[in-house]
Image: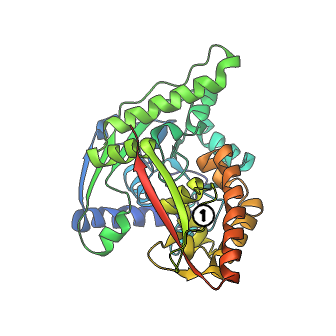
Amino acid sequence: MQPVTASPSRLTPAQRHFRAFGRRLTRFVEAWLTRTTITGSENIPLQGPVIFAGNHASTYDAVLIIAHLPEATELVGPGDFKLLFPAEHVIELAGIVRIKRATLDRDSLRLMSGALEAGLNLALFPEGGTWEKRLEDVKPGVAYLSHMHHVPVVPISFGGTYQVWRKLMLLQRPEIHIHFGEPLPPVEIVDRKQRAQALHDYSLMLMRHIYEHLPSEDQARYDNAARARYRAELVADAADTLSDRGMDFSVLAEFASKPNLISPLWRNARLPLKPLARHDRFYPAADFVIAAERLCSALNGEFAGYLNYRLGDEKAAQALDELDALQQFALDAHRSGHKLKFMVSETLVD
């Protein structure tokens, strides 16, 4: 079965041509630089509207969506920070709908609703982004749109894409698995008072369908994320431990341990977070003071809601307390002429 190929009317001719080029390029990359297996293609509906919803561990997932979904599909991507080159330009050239994820972005919601009402498909990532997370951390956006417009949802399982760009650059021919699941019926809500719970239950059910068709290593990453506990301490180059004052920096340790969580603020926004991101050497204590100040300012300003959306309100508030403590510890070390290392540990609990 082959999907229809009507072009979305919102796209310019240049954007349609760019997507066509992207599909051809991705097929070439798949054939020569990866070992890609695709199953369940018969579950792609011939007519819309439908919502395609996949797990999200890499920006490569978006490339696969452009390559393998019907042309009459609106794609949704991040709009709350600038992406690294060339991704920022690719998003513009492909005409992807950008959404500010930590806020109620009414303009983007209007575009997504308009696409479904026009009979087009919509492609979203129900987890909200690529950061490392538990299966239960799914967001309700897909379920909400399915309910409001009474459209089915096709789950997509992307396997082997986590940190895949490095493997591609090293010509390691990574194994990629794509599975299109059977369409799930639209969300039905009988009691509007229970809407939030119904949307969450549907979202979790969707993620479990996706999980079932992931390779074991991708399933393990979700499983371990649910069991992981983090802690960190500031160690001075004189073998003193400065963070033994009852602060284990658990949220900052989690933030620093997850490449896809810290990278947008460190590499994309260019905040001076190297002392938190790289744990293999000592840095001048002043670097930690600057890192804490700049990160705290960003989380209270331009990136307000960044951690709330990704880790929850409680951890976001705790992160600010930990940054204040880290800054004070680093100031003490700076006055005494010490260098510091941010020592992070991760344990798995039953």
Packing grade of label 1 (10 A; few <14, some 14-19, many >=20) is: some
Quarter of the picture containing the N terminus is: top left
Q: Quadrant of residue 43?
A: top left
Disc 1 is placed on an element classified as loop
Q: Is residue 292 above or below residue 217?
A: below
Q: Residue at x 47, y 79 (%)?
A: 281
Q: Quadrant of residue 298?
A: bottom right
| Outermost residue to the bottom | 337
| Outermost residue to the top | 190
Q: Nearer the viewer, residue 250 or 92?
A: 250
Q: Is residue 102 visible?
A: no
Q: Residue at x 65, y 39 (%)?
A: 113
Give percent across and percent down for residue 289.
Answer: 69, 75
Q: Is residue 126 above or below residue 316?
A: above
Quarter of the picture containing the C terminus is: top left
Tally of marks: 1
Please give the residue where the numbered disc 1 appears in the rendered image. 243
Q: Nearer the viewer, residue 348 or 28?
A: 348
Give, as a three-letter code, the residue at label 1: Ser
Q: Residue at x 54, y 63 (%)?
A: 233
Q: Is residue 116 visible?
A: yes
Give percent across and percent down for residue 240.
Answer: 54, 73
- Is 330 on the left or on the right of 213, as rendered? right
Q: Is residue 268 above or below residue 31?
A: below
Give percent across and percent down for residue 259.
Answer: 47, 63
Q: Nearer the viewer, residue 218 or 128?
A: 218
Q: Residue at x 55, y 68 (%)?
A: 241
- Is 266 on the left or on the right of 317, as rendered? left
Give percent across and percent down for residue 29.
Answer: 29, 67
Q: Nearer the viewer, residue 179 or 322?
A: 322
